[in-house]
């Protein structure tokens, strides 16, 4: 096992990896930008090294800065988390050249699967169905437009690089194609430095189902079943669960087998996720390969909760050369787990990201509830990074019990000082179609107005009374850096 | 609502219910039964001390809602715009945030340039 591991990330995922290191007896080294000098991951790690200014390009995205930090502390391994450099083939290659173990697949595998165009070809070679579409070799706008006419509308314009729905555009009629191509290309270049685009027929009302895989360096590959991630707003997942209410045992076997076959075909190593679109229901449902995420997923905890496998520890063990500890037939799903992502965003204002100070932040503590978070009360949520505040995972014997548990936990999770989507998540968990497991990737966007209508309106008398009771000079629960006493005492009313 | 007991650390017992509350000088944030309320405790409108924040929607729509970077400025002074036109494209937290014209009109002033970091509430474009 490694003596010292550097975590090239921040926030909740850095905290998650630090905790795994502690359990393994591996020394953890955090890295940070100037905006994160006092962040939770820095406080929790055994050591911490400054990378640079707040801007990601000069800190968490800087291969040179991260490798310099790793050399400085003589780290034997680097865990990239998700986002930032996690899917950078150049970073994985640079680690290899520096003699540092990269906790992830080899650079050539990341490069091949990171190109969605190449990944589609690989899936087709492995005999796995892909969404009908077109991959224009000539990337001029006119050529792409011509290809779009052949694919037919509605369709999706997708960047070959990246993920998270960034740069992906739905186009329902030809007239809207030119601006969609231009915007997709602009966003793809800005986010990933690669403007290559391809087209896919839009599958109406698909479910998004993904399969977790683990592959060691000795030829062992297993899958850890599926995660259903259909509840997305603008291609950003907000609620995930496992097992999927739509996946039958026969379909589960086919999905798992396809994911393992793809991993073998790709020479995959370490943890990864094979994403599929699911069309229809029951044993006859059709699935299409979407892409492979060559890293740990944000939503990995739900798989951990139902399989009992610690994916982060498994990742580190695989990177250290250990064989997989489980055979496929020993892996089981037990009960049900649901994750909700609490974001600093305002659903009523088009999910606008929010920045500011967490005046009060209290995580619930109750049976079957796990919170993965990288923040603490008094922290500033900055404009520089992802607005994820916490992942709340509820686990229970059945789906319905897990759903109710997630709701109960959100009801005991006060986050004040920054608007969050917590009430929106509660409304979503109570939506009849979510209650019934009848979800698809368009549900959140279509039901947005109905969900927002259920958000808190006029404060009840109890809330007004509590507001009045806050001492005038208090600037937060911490009482830190209080300016002059608040001269105002009368309540004027409430704001939105 | 007479009975409020301060339990300390931002916790309040209000008519037998547990509420959490915190606040900077201008507003109070209250958490009750899973819902968050932002309650403005400043004096009534008309007080000059509150003037800077008393913008009407029209002006607010032309300001950044949060700290952001200006990705593109699509208009110049004197230009006529239609309702819904994207005047300025901002970028924050990996997302594009379009600032759209709340009504048709002529651009009187452009107060930002590409690459600039802008703060919330400050007008980016003014319409005549």
Image (cartoon, rainbow, N blue to C red):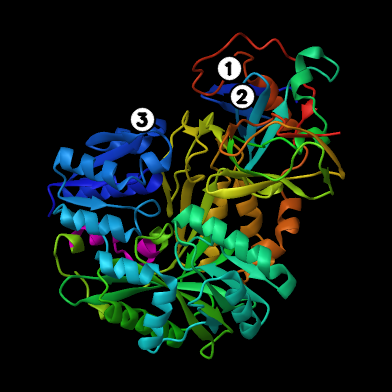
Q: CA distance from mark 1 to mark 3?
A: 25 Å
Give the alpha-carbon distance from disc 2 to disc 3, as whole Å. Answer: 25 Å
Instruction: Tell me where residue B40 appears, x and y as whole percent.
Output: 73, 26
Please name whichever residue, A191 or A491, is drawn nearer the observer in this view of the structure.
Answer: A191
Identify the mark at residue A22; answer none if there is no mark: none
Alpha-carbon neighbours of circle 1 within 10 Å: few (<14), some, or many (≥20)?
A: many
Q: Quadrant of residue A327?
A: bottom left
Q: In what element is the residue under mark 1?
A: loop
Task: Give the side of residue A450 with respect to residue A139, left or right.
Answer: right
Q: Are marks 2 and 3 on the same chain?
A: no
The residue pinned by badge 2 equals B23
Residue A98 position within the rendered picture, expressed as x and y whole percent measured from the top left: 16, 52
Measuring from the top left, give residue A79's x and y in whole percent: 27, 52
- Of circles 2 and 3, the one toward us is 3
Q: Quadrant of the C terminus of chain A?
A: top right
Q: Which residues are magenta?
A: A303-317
Tell me if A288 is positioned left or right of A485 in this view.
Answer: left
For residue A313, what is the image quadrant? bottom left
Same chain check for tags 1 and 2: no
Look at discs 1 and 3 and give the one toward the viewer: 3
Say which residue label 3 marks: A37
Q: Which residue is mark 1?
A: A474
Question: Do callouts 1 and 2 mark residues in contact (Cβ within 8 Å)?
Answer: yes
């Amino acid at each position: 096992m490694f003596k010292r591991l550097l975590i090239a990330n921040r926030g909740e995922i850095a905290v998650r990896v630090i905790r795994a290191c502690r359990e393994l007896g591996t020394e953890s080294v955090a890295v940070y930008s100037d905006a994160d000098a006092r962040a939770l991951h820095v406080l929790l790690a055994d050591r911490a090294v400054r990378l640079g200014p707040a801007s990601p390009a000069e800190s968490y995205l800087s291969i040179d800065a991260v490798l310099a930090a790793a050399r400085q502390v003589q780290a034997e391994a680097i865990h990239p988390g998700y986002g930032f450099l996690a899917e950078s083939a150049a970073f994985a290659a640079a680690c290899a050249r520096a003699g540092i173990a990269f906790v992830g697949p080899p650079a050539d595998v990341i490069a091949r699967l990171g190109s969605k165009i190449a990944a589609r070809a690989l899936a087709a070679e492995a005999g796995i169905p892909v969404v009908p579409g077109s991959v224009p070799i000539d990337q001029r706008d006119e050529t792409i437009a011509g290809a779009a006419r052949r694919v037919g509308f509605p369709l999706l314009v997708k960047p070959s690089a990246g993920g998270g729905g960034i740069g992906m555009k739905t186009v329902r009629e030809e007239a809207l194609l030119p601006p969609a191509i231009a915007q997709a290309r602009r966003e793809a270049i800005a986010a990933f430095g690669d403007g290559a685009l391809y087209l896919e027929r839009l599958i109406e009302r698909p479910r998004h189902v993904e399969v977790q895989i683990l592959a060691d360096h000795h030829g062992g590959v297993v899958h850890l079943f599926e995660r259903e991630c259909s509840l997305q707003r603008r291609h950003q997942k907000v609620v995930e669960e496992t097992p999927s209410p739509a996946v039958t045992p026969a379909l589960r076997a086919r999905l798992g087998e396809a994911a393992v076959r793809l991993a073998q075909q790709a020479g995959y190593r370490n943890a990864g996720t094979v994403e599929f679109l699911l069309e229809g229901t029951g044993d006859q449902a059709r699935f299409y390969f979407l892409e492979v995420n060559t890293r740990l997923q944000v939503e990995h905890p739900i798989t951990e909760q139902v399989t009992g496998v610690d994916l982060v520890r498994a990742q580190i063990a695989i990177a250290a050369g250990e064989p997989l500890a489980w055979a496929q037939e020993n892996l089981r799903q037990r009960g049900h787990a649901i994750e909700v992502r609490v974001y600093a965003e305002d659903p009523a204002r088009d999910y606008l990201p929010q920045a500011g100070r967490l005046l009060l932040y209290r995580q619930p503590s109750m049976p079957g509830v796990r919170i993965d978070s990288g923040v603490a009360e008094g922290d500033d949520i900055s404009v520089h990074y992802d607005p994820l505040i916490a992942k709340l995972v509820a686990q229970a014997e059945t789906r319905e019990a897990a759903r109710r548990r997630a709701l109960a936990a959100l009801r005991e999770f006060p986050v004040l000082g920054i608007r969050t989507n917590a009430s929106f998540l509660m409304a979503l968990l109570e939506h009849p179609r979510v209650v019934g497991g009848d979800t698809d990737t368009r549900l959140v966007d279509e039901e947005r107005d109905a969900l927002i209508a259920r958000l808190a309106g006029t404060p009840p008398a109890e809330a007004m009374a509590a507001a009045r009771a806050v001492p005038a000079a208090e600037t937060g629960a911490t009482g830190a850096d209080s300016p002059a006493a608040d001269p105002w005492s009368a309540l004027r009313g409430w704001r939105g | 609502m007479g009975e409020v007991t301060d339990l300390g650390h931002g916790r309040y017992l209000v008519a037998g219910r547990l509420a959490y509350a915190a606040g900077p000088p201008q507003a109070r944030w209250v958490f009750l039964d899973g819902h968050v309320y932002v309650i403005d405790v400043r004096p009534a409108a008309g007080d000059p001390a509150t003037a800077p924040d008393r913008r009407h929607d029209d002006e607010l729509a032309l300001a950044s809602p949060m700290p952001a970077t200006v990705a593109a400025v699509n208009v110049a002074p004197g230009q006529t715009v239609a309702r819904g036109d994207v005047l300025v494209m901002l970028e924050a937290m990996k997302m594009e945030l379009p600032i759209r014209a709340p009504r048709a009109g002529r651009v009187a002033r452009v107060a930002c340039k590409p690459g600039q970091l802008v703060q919330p509430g400050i007008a980016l474009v003014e319409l005549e």
